[in-house]
Image (cartoon, rainbow, N blue to C red):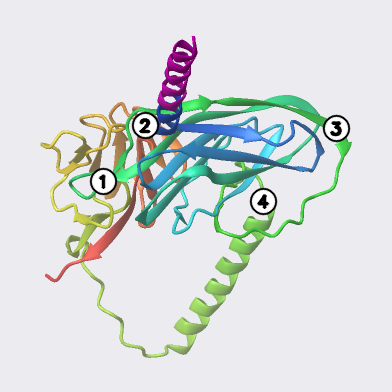
Amino acid sequence: MKSFAAFLFAIALTFIVVISANAQSTESIWLTVDTTTFKTRETVVATLHASSTTPIQGFTFQIRYDPSCLKPVNAVSQVPGMNALPLPQISGLADGSYASTTPQTINGILAEVRFVTLGGCQTDLKLESAALAIRNESGFAAPLENVTVAQESVALTIDKALGEESAESLTGSVLPLEPPPAAGQGIGTWAIVLLSILLVGGLLFGAFKHLKIGVPAAPKPSAAAQLPTLQIKHGPQSGKSFTLDKLPCFIGRDPENEICLDDPHIISQHAKVFKAKNGYFLMDLGGETFVNGRAIHQSSASLKPGDVVRLGKSALFVFGSQQTQT
């Protein structure tokens, strides 16, 4: 009888060890909120957790929210070495990305994401997508495979009664998440500023011509001496700069493209840059394409130096120009 009991105990112990090992080896991400009831103007702190036995070098997340109930403020990560990578924000979607130069073992909090409540409503926060990033054999950032999103949505109740605003000081790498102002906001102020600049500029120009101050004119660079460039800021081939000396320039996962980005969220022929009417344009070819945070779906948008373009979830580049010697 004693030997049979010992045999059962050994089986149970083995079963517990196997379950524990499987639980530790599972790669997962989940979202929690300490409390689900708030008043207006209070701060909602959503916590992004992760468990991974594989050391990571970054992570991304997209949290869907109702812009009539919540306003995203920022995210902060206290994981050592994790640095915030600001992305263009879209109203209704808090888009965050962090990266580290050295691998980090994660088993706890990845980041805290803060929202301010705007008024009485019933709403929820939904973890629309999340990924843990590693460095692949080619040295590029790549998502860790087989990561489970364990808890995607958190329901919130917001009372219309006013609460106290948070004055909490943040430590760690802070990532701004505020979306751009809606069209039409601040038009009066900006119109006054622009009018003042034009007026002062006109007066100075008139005085300059009247006094005929002789200043040698700087030679104007010819249009042919300006070549457009794409500077990859995040994602595959991060840090590289491409001079677009051949247009149209196709961008996608297919190696036959002028710019190849090996990213699972980028389609084989994702977008193209072309020239028309003395300007440069970006055309979406069926993937997720954003210019300065604005979605472009199977259409084109003009490109100017400094414009930020995002393809897929995390491939980010800046459009610019480069002067060449003629």
| Quadrant of the drawing holding the C terminus | bottom left
Could you tell me how far apart the alpha carbons at marks 3 and 4 are, in whole angstroms?
Answer: 27 Å
- Which residue: 56% across, 66% down? 198
Of mark 3 and mark 1, the one earlier in the sequence is: 3
In this rendering, position of residue 32 left or right of residue 245: right
Could you tell me how far apart the alpha carbons at marks 3 and 2 are, in whole angstroms?
Answer: 37 Å
Kind of residue sitting beneath label 3: Lys
Query: Residue 281 at x, y = what percent?
Result: 30, 43
In this rendering, position of residue 226 left or right of residue 56: left
Residue depth check, mark 2 versus mark 4: number of the one nearer the observer: 2
Could you tell me how far apart the alpha carbons at marks 1 and 2 are, in whole angstroms?
Answer: 16 Å
Q: Which residues are magenta?
A: 1-18
Of mark 1 and mark 2, the one earlier in the sequence is: 1
Residue depth check, mark 4 versus mark 1: number of the one nearer the observer: 1
Could you tell me how far apart the alpha carbons at marks 2 and 4 are, in whole angstroms?
Answer: 30 Å
Kind of residue sitting beneath label 4: Gly
Could you tell me how far apart the alpha carbons at marks 3 and 1 are, in whole angstroms?
Answer: 45 Å
How many other residues sit within 10 Å of disc 4, few (<14), some (14-19) or many (≥20)? few
Give whichever of 10, 256 is nearer the camera: 10
Of mark 4 and mark 1, the one earlier in the sequence is: 4
For label 1, the residue is: 236
Disc assigned to residue 288:
2
Give whichever of 78, 227 is nearer the camera: 78
Q: Is residue 4 a member of the stretch shown in magenta?
A: yes
